[in-house]
Amino acid sequence: MRTAKRTIDSLNFWSGILFGLGAVAFIDETIFHQLLHWHHFYDLSTTSVGLISDGLFHAFSWFATVASLFMVADLRRKKSFQKKRWIGAYMLGAGVFQLYDGIIQHKIMRLHQIRYVEEVIYYDIVWNVIAGFMIVMGLAILNSAKQNSKTKVSDEPVA
Amino acid sequence: MSRLHNNEYTIWNLEDFLILIFFIVIITVYVSAVKQANRKYRNKWPIHRNCLFISGVICIMFAVFGPIAEYAHHHFVFHMYSHLMLGMLGPLLMALSAPMTLLLRSLSVRHARKISKLLKSKYVQFVSHPIIASILNLGGLWILYTTSLFETMHHSTILYVLVHTHIFLAGFLFTIAIIYIDPTPYRRSFLLRSVVLVLYMAGHSILSKWIFANPPVGVKQHEAEIGGMTMYYGGDLIDVMIAIILCYQIYKSESLKNIRKAIQLKLN
């Protein structure tokens, strides 16, 4: 029984993480690449490792979005969707991916910059602070979801 | 000069005519097979599969015949459109129309057995492995765009036909290696197919960025840029369709598992 509950919990957690990752990649693609044209499709200073990393992340984020939504559908079908845990995991996933994008892909691999202006450092700071904020929020929500499920378990009469 | 031009025009027309006949024959074969199958089976062949097959054939036809194919000789962007239709969208639509199921239904038992024996052969088992199929598909594309093959192809009709046949066949093989619509004797796990699909999508997008930065021989820089982006976004669109179908199949098989479990519980 306990293992079944654990599986359900981790399914909720991972589908949230995957959807967060996919959502950030999607926002990045539509807003920063397509609408604002801040990001460049291909920056001439891109390293080949950066190109491969970007390709893998791009592919994985698309697949993650699709797969995570089917995982939610599956959880709802089993009537075991945990909204709070899912939203917490979603924020954590989104924050971690944005931090990865902001520090490793933009700065270390130099895939492309947030915007091609003189003082890109301010953009970088805002970008990464938002990422950090999402990670903290996500962890807090996850923690409270955990507390909730613990109290629920202890509330039940011992058989 | 004008006579030469006229001559060229006539030759092209003959080729176009033959291509058109070829596609009409393919559609006729499919539709008559449907009639044959409907005579034998009580449950009729669904109409949407006819539509899928015919739209798949039309996709491929537009890739090798007509205005898009004509422009594809001179403009790289149109080459990309035709490539997306020939190697990705056409094969996907055709795979969804379940051609092998139809073939098995319409043939006599003796012949159908031969076909299913062929499908179970070592060779088919090998090439339809997701990893092999994706290497055949992506590897072919990498060779086409990173070597001088792309330019050579436009000067030799045989090479042109060979390359285009390969793009279609490899695209079809890859699609049926990832999503199972037809009877598939050797089924690979969902995990393997998902991983291969992600790697394939990554390889496709890396190649399109590579083309963006390093134009193939004989392609202008700005054409390569638009072409690369077309390949990137167009490829994404079709790959996501494949991902949705694959995940839907996983989702459905999970529900099948649950039903089986419930039945077993009841029986016990």
Image (spheres, coloured by chain):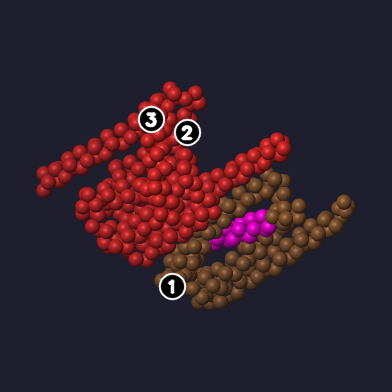
Chain colours: A brown, B red
Residue closer to the observer: B105 or A36? B105
Marked residue chain, label 3: B
Q: Which quarter of the figure has residue B18?
A: top left
* Pointer 3 local density, CA inside 10 Å: few below 14, some 14–19, many at least 20: few
Q: Is residue B228 left or right of residue B195?
A: left
User: Furthest residue to the front?
Assistant: B268
Residue marked by disc 3? B110
Q: Which structural element holds mark 2?
A: helix
Q: Amino acid at mark 1?
A: Thr
State whether the magenta stretch is mostly helix, strand or loop: helix
Circle 2: residue type: His
Residue B227, given in percent of the width and then of the height, sits at 37, 57
Q: Chain of mark 1?
A: A
How many neighbours does mark 2 have within 10 angstroms: few (below 14), some (14-19), or many (20 or more)? few
Q: Residue at x 25, y 54 (%)?
A: B153
Contact? badges 2 and 3 (CB < 8 Å)? no
What residue is shown with label 1? Answer: A47
Residue at numbered disc 2: B48
- The spot of residue B94 in percent (x, y) is 41, 40
Residue at screen point 37% across, 39% down: B57
Measured from the top left, where is residue A30 in percent x and y?
Answer: 53, 58
Tell us which disc is closer to us: 3 or 1: 3
The segment highlighted magenta reads A10-28
User: Can the viewer see residue B240?
Assistant: no
- Distance (Cα) linking label 2 and label 1: 46 Å
The local crowd at label 1, few if under 14, some if 14 to 19, many if 20 or more residues have their Cα within 10 Å, is some
Callout 1 secondary element: loop
Q: Nearer the viewer, residue A62 or B8?
A: A62
Asked whether residue A95 appears in the rendered view, the answer is yes
Do the residues at pointers 2 and 3 share their chain?
yes
